Image: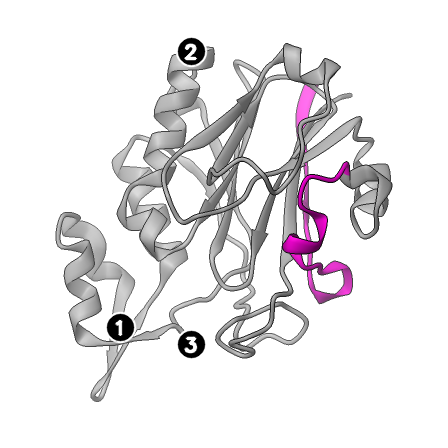
Amino acid sequence: MIKETLFFGSTQNSYEPALFHGKTLLNHEPFAAVGKQLGLKQLVFVHQVHGTDGLVLTQAAAHKKTPSFVVEADYLLTNVPGIGLGVSTADCLPVVMFDPVKSVVGAIHAGWRGARSNIIGRAIERAQEEFGSCAADLEFHFGPSAHGCCYEVQSPFAHEFAAYPFAIKAFRKEGDRLYFDLPTFAALQLQSLGVKKINKHKDCTVCIPGYCSVRKNAYSPQRQMTVVTLANF
């Protein structure tokens, strides 16, 4: 049986991505400890640019070392057990995708720009093209991120999501202040695509201690990791 195994990090195992550019991560902490915990043969992160491009790691990738924090992309997909897919965040939404039918996993970096540009939908489309995945079969897990309790935005920000009629449900007004709930928007987006299994993490990275957050520490380069892999049980 093949099942996904995932890890949501915190400040206890945070890191500065730029320091690991091009390196084999399982040789370095904090990645080595996570790799051991998940039984990884390889761990790959991409250089996130808030876009909608992705990296697919097939069996050929299992025989070579893909350098991390180099390829510009914001999602990763694989059907190879033992390859860990990593996402770095500090308020953006880390999304894990699992297809139990086709045995595929994905890791998606969904900030508000990526969410607006439908990066999660793009990742689903790529999984359909590469592996024959079906949206109705997919399971999604959201990691810690900024939530609607703390994600304050300006009024014009709401216009960024005008293409999505359901987006109004992800905004909350409190007096003159406007708040955006990124996990809620992503869940509504997934539901509109036919996804039924969505698990949202309860922690907000802004108001819950122990998480990297650019809203708390605007100039900090530290990020927390989300890692997913396929494992044999």
Number of residues whose C-alpha sits closer than 10 Å to that of mark 2, classed few (under 14), some (14–19) or many (20 or more): some
Say if the magenta span includes residue 19.
yes
Q: Amino acid at mark 2?
A: Gly
77 lies left or right of 81: left
> What type is the residue that disc 1 sits on?
Arg
User: Which residue lies under the disc numbered 1?
Assistant: 172
122 horizontally vs 82: left or right? left
On the image, the x and y values in percent for residue 75 come to 48, 36
Q: Nearer the viewer, mark 1 or mark 2?
A: 2
Q: Residue at x 18, y 75 (%)?
A: 155
Camera-near label (1 vs 3) is 3
Task: Tell which of 118 and 43 is nearer to you.
Answer: 43
| Residue at the image point whose x is 43% and y is 16% from the top | 133
In the image, residue 37 lies in the stretch drawn in magenta: no
Q: Is residue 5 above or below residue 218?
A: above
Q: Secondary structure at mark 3?
A: loop
Asked if 130 appears above or below 56 in the picture, the reply is above
Which mark, residue 132? 2
Residue to which mark 3 is pinned: 150
3 or 2: tag closer to the N-terminus: 2
10 Å crowding of disc 3: few (<14), some (14-19), many (20+): some
Q: Secondary structure under badge 2?
A: loop
The image shows residue 194 at horizontal and vertical percentages of 30, 30
> How many residues crowd mark 1 within 10 Å: few (<14), some (14–19), many (20+)?
some
Q: Nearer the viewer, residue 48 or 6?
A: 48
Instruction: Name the amino acid type tagged 3.
Output: Cys
Q: Could you say where residue 168 lies in the image, as x and y percent from the top left?
A: 19, 60
CB within 8 Å, label 3 to label 2 = no
Span of residues in magenta = 2-24
The residue shown at (19%, 51%) is: 166
